[in-house]
Structures are given as C-alpha cells and as structure tokens.
Amino acid sequence: MIDDRLHDADPYRPEIIGQLDGADQTLLEEIMSADRMPAPWRRRLIAPIAAAAALIGVLAVSAVIRHQRPETHEADRPAPTTGADWNALVLRAAEQNPRLLIQEPGWKITTVYGFTENSGTMRFTKGDHDLEINWYPAKEYPGYYADRLDVSKPEPGKVDGIDGNIFTYDASDFAMQLKPNGDTFAELRTGGKWTRSAFDQELTRIKRVDVQTWLAAMPPEIVTPGRADEAAAKALEGVPLPPKFDRAALNAVGTNDQYQFGAAVAARVGCGWIEEWQRAKQAGDQVALEKAADALRSSHQWKVLQRMDKDGDYPEVFWEMADQTAAGKPPAGYRGALGCP
C-alpha cells in the first residue's frame, strides 16, 4: 500500500525495496519489526501502488520508502483496452486468490490494496484488534517460509480447510502462513492487543468465499472494479492530464481503499507529465516544456492529493518530485518513488 506498511513493523512484501527475498528480506523485516508503528505512520510508509525507495533509493529526494509492484505473467499479455475488459481482468485475478473474509459481526475492512495479479492486501479492524491478510505468488512461498523459521518454531494450523503454520513473534503478535493454493498463498498477521487463544479462535471464523461475495463485502469507500469509473472521475477533478493519458487503465488497478486508489491515479498523471517534460526537454519544445512544468506545479492544488495528505506522505513525495522536475531537475528515482506503472 503506499503507506500501509513497511508493514506494521514487518514488511512482508519482497517488492518493497526492489525485489528482496531471502536474507535481504529477513534483514529488512527485522529492522522494521523492532516496534509496531502507530497507524498514522504506517499509512505514511506503504503506498498503494507503488514506491520502491524514496529513502533508500533516492535519499537526496525524500525520506519515505515506497514499494513497487512486481512484474507478473500478466505483463506479457496484450493489455485490455476497454473498461469491461479491465474489469474482467480484475475479477479473474480476484478468483486466483483464496478470498478470505472474517465471518463475525463487528469487523470492518479498513485497507485493501491490489488484487490485479497474484498478490494483494486486506486489513480487518475491530476495536483494538487488527488482522491483515497478504497474498503472494506461490513461487515465493519457500523463501517466506524459510524467513519465518527465524521468528519461531512453526505450529500447524488451518483456515477453512487450508493447511498452514503459525509463527509467534511475541505474546501478542502472531502470523499464520497458509500453504500455496493454486498460484498464490496467504499470510495472516495480527496487530493490536491479541492473545494466542483469541487468534486461534478467530482463525475458525475466517472463511473462503466466492468473488462476488468478496466484492460485495467491501464497504462503500473501497474502490472495487464496478466503482472505478466514478472514483476516477472524482480523483481527476481539476487535474490536468498529460498527453496520451489512458483513463481506462485506471480500471485495472484492482480493488483498493481510497488512499491507494488515489496514489494510483496520481502516479499515472504525475509520471506522464514528468515523461512529457523529459520529451520536451530533449526535443527543445519550449512550449510543451512549460506546459508540463505548469501542470506539475499545479499538483499542490489537486484535490486528490490534498485529501490524501492528512493520511500519509505520498503527496509530499509527489510534490517534491513534481517541484524538482518543474525546476529543471527531475529526480533520477522518480519512477520508483511515485510508483509509475
């Protein structure tokens, strides 16, 4: 997510800094898991779509870590060109994941990110309890399992018929790593005030559902494929669009909360304008150069970024990249920091 984590102090994702795995991923997890970060700062560290390394890869530009989506087999397929095709792609991707929901009143879905490929994130919240589920490609399971062996001895567990292993970080922090199911596997991680008995009990209330039930469970603020057009229109209000901007591509960003969807929109617009600035600079097209610079400077007034600013740091990173480009010095690491598609 853009910010939703360097993961509450355990950034599972191997794509957070480039493509980490094995010892590198374990080291990053141990560094980040020293403390469970408060929610506002988590939101400031994990981008919906994005971001590979404003802190590590672009130290001179920003102090925020972003993660970038890994390439998948979908990248080799011809890109759909209509909203209906994009929605079908998203639905097929959702069907590839073991869709899990907590079947108990009181839990609310508060974060959703991805599900356009074989990965994604959901967080459920109830009072002072969080439960996050992350999906990853099945081929990465051996590396993740090996990493978790450094956390604790695995204990067998099960979620709605799917076998897995429970790992204990401390007395109130647990992870349930499910074995691969098709092209993916899922890992559940607690946040907040848990006990082992409460975690074991909650695992019995998590069920697999069909994709339509899964999508129907999303609260109104979550951008599902059917809500993407309306959400895109709101996000693009007052935003100047770069040449060749493909609005239909926003239907392919999956199922996301408002922050993650907003970052997906901003990334496509901002990256398009930076690329146009670079093209105009190389071509000596002064008119186009000024137009691109003006568009990037105007990003401080974009409502989509202003709405996001209270929840995370993606807008600050975006504005820094935009301002430096408009000043004639586009940062070398802007694609990773903004999460360019």
Image (cartoon, grey):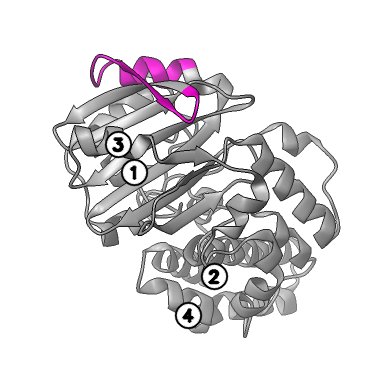
Give residue 105's quadrant in the image. Answer: bottom left
Amino acid residing under circle 3: Gln
| Mark pair 4, 3: CA separation | 47 Å
Amino acid type at circle 4 is: His
On the image, numbered disc 1 is attached to which residue?
7
Number of numbered discs on residues: 4
Examine the structure image and report whether residue 143 is included in the region drawn in magenta: yes
The alpha-carbon separation of the residues under discs 3 and 1 comes to: 24 Å
Q: Secondary structure at mark 3?
A: helix
Residue 220 marker: 2
Q: Is residue 44 above or below residue 269?
A: above
Nearer the N terminus, badge 1 or badge 4?
1
* N-term-proximal mark, 4 vs 2: 2
Q: Residue furthest left?
A: 171
- Give the SS element for disc 4: helix
Per the rendered image, the range of residues in magenta is: 142-162
On screen, residue 10 versus residue 184, left or right, reads left
Asked whether 88 falls inside the magenta stretch, the response is no
Task: Say the numbered circle drawn on residue 201.
Answer: 3
In the image, which disc is placed on residue 146?
Answer: none
Residue 219 in picture, x, y percent from top left: 51, 65
Horizontal placement of 288 versus 193: left or right?
A: right
Dot placed on the residue nearer the N-terminal end, 1 or 2: 1
Disc 3 residue crowd, few under 14, some 14–19, many 20+, Cα 10 Å = few
Which disc is residue 300 wearing?
A: 4
Name the residue: 26% across, 32% down.
174
Please give the name of the residue rendered at 36% of the width and 42% of the height, measured from the top-left corner.
56
